[in-house]
Amino acid sequence: MEQYPVHRMIDLTVQPLRSYSCQAGKVDIWCPAPALMVTRVTGTLVTEGATAIEEVMLRRAAEDGRLLVFNDWEQMNDYEQAARTRLTEASRSILETLDGGHFLLRSRVVVFGVQVANAALRKLAVHPSRASFERSLGDALRERGPAV
């Protein structure tokens, strides 16, 4: 498995709960604690990858009654419009149980897409650095405890 800095935060040696991969990009999803979800996207987020995120997100929100999402999208360079729309609408459908979404981004295109989504959701935070993202993720892991 490739080394990736978020490995320090959660045990990613455990297989992701869900993955989607195609030539354009890859999505990995972990749920390391109750009401907590972590996604990592590399390359382009295609609609099928967004569907994988949506399905886990909706299931976790329904099961746990609330959800906080951390999105390590630093290696994501683009997205399909339908993928962004799908995730925005799914987030809107659970807005009352959504504690927030944290993003680590590098691509200006992806930053713009998250800003557009946040205009509707008003619960998304973009971190200025990996250190800030990992501090917030570490705090959430300590607060929510290990997955059961």
Image (cartoon, rainbow, N blue to C red):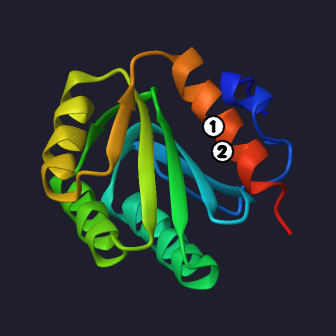
**Residue nearer the viewer, 77 or 30:** 30
Q: Is residue 91 above or below residue 110?
A: below
Task: Determine which residue is flagged by label 2.
Answer: 140
Q: Which amino acid does label 2 sit on?
A: Ala
Q: Which amino acid does label 1 sit on?
A: Leu
**Residue 105, horizontal then vertical, whole percent:** 38, 27
**Residue 136, horizontal then vertical, whole percent:** 59, 33
**Residue nearer the viewer, 146 or 28:** 146
Report if residue 31 is visible in the image: yes
Q: Total number of numbered labels? A: 2
How crowded is the residue under tag 1: few (<14 C-alpha within 10 Å), some, or many (20+)?
Answer: many
Residue occupying the point 73% across, 49% down: 143
Q: Residue 13 vs residue 107: left or right?
A: right
Residue occupying the point 75% across, 23% down: 3
Residue occupying the point 43% across, 69% down: 54
Snapshot quadrant of residue 106: top left
Local secondary structure at mark 1 = helix
Local secondary structure at mark 2 = helix
Q: In this view, does 118 lie above or below 125?
A: below
Task: Determine which residue is flagged by label 1.
Answer: 137
Q: Which mark is residue 45?
A: none
How crowded is the residue under tag 2: few (<14 C-alpha within 10 Å), some, or many (20+)?
Answer: some
Does the CB distance between marks 1 and 2 fall below 8 Å?
yes
